[in-house]
Image (cartoon, rainbow, N blue to C red):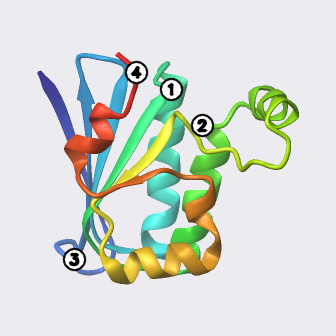
Amino acid sequence: MYNRLTFLTGENLMSQAFTITKTDGPITVLHLDGHLDSQAEGMLVESVRQTQAAGIHLLVLDFSNVEMITSAGLRALHRIYKMFTPHDEMEAWQKAHEGEVYKSPYFKLAGVSPEVHYVLSIAGFLQNIPIYPTFQEAMESFPT
């Protein structure tokens, strides 16, 4: 069962939206649409913050309908990554796996277009945030 809540942003409300889907389990999904830019950044980060405050610690951002990402969108992803990455856990992992890069087991992206993937690659996000070709693969990647 899913509960959905849709947010619209920007001057043209049809151009940018995201839907939060809360599953019966511990995973929350945000289906993003349009541009991940400065107009969407604040509302996206605040929605994720509220989701986390409600006790949710597993998040998938579905990028299937994201057309472009700007530096503000990258900043939003970085802020969300930090929210879903326990600092103590990351430090302990890095000590145990010296020289390896930590990938978040709590925050994942799905359905990223080649254009957005390229931007994420240049910005270095592919090192720390797991990206899956499909939404279903991202959901199945969480331990059961």
Relative to the observer, which residue lies in front, 101 or 124?
101
Q: Residue 57 shows which numbered tag? A: 1
Query: Of callouts 2 and 4, which one flags the residue occurring earlier in the amino acid sequence?
Result: 2
Helix, strand or loop at mark 2:
loop
Mark earlier in primary sequence (1, 2)? 1
Q: Is residue 116 left or right of residue 77?
A: left
Give the Cα separation between the discs numbered 2 and 4.
16 Å
Give the distance between the C-alpha atoms of the residues marked 3 and 1, in whole angstroms: 29 Å
Instruction: State yes or no: discs 1 and 2 in contact (Cβ < 8 Å).
Output: yes
Judging by the rendered image, the residue that carries numbered circle 3 is 15
Where is the C terminus found, in terms of image quarters? Answer: top left
Rendered position, 59 above or below 44: above
The residue that appears at 52% across and 29% down in the rendered structure is 52
Instruction: Tell me the SS state at disc 3.
Output: loop
Decide: marks 2, 4 in contact (CB < 8 A)? no
Question: Residue 13, relative to residue 30: is it above or below?
Answer: below
Q: Residue drawn 18% across and 29% down?
A: 3
Q: Earlier in the sequence, mark 4 or mark 3?
A: 3
Sequence-first tag of 2 and 3: 3
Look at mark 4 in the image and give the residue it sits on.
Answer: 143
Q: Nearer the viewer, mark 2 or mark 3?
A: 2
Mark 4 vs mark 3: in front: 4
Give the residue type at disc 4.
Pro
Q: Is residue 17 left or right of residue 47?
A: left
Residue at the image position 33 percent from the left and 79 percent from the top: 114
Give coordinates of residue 87: x percent, y percent: 78, 34
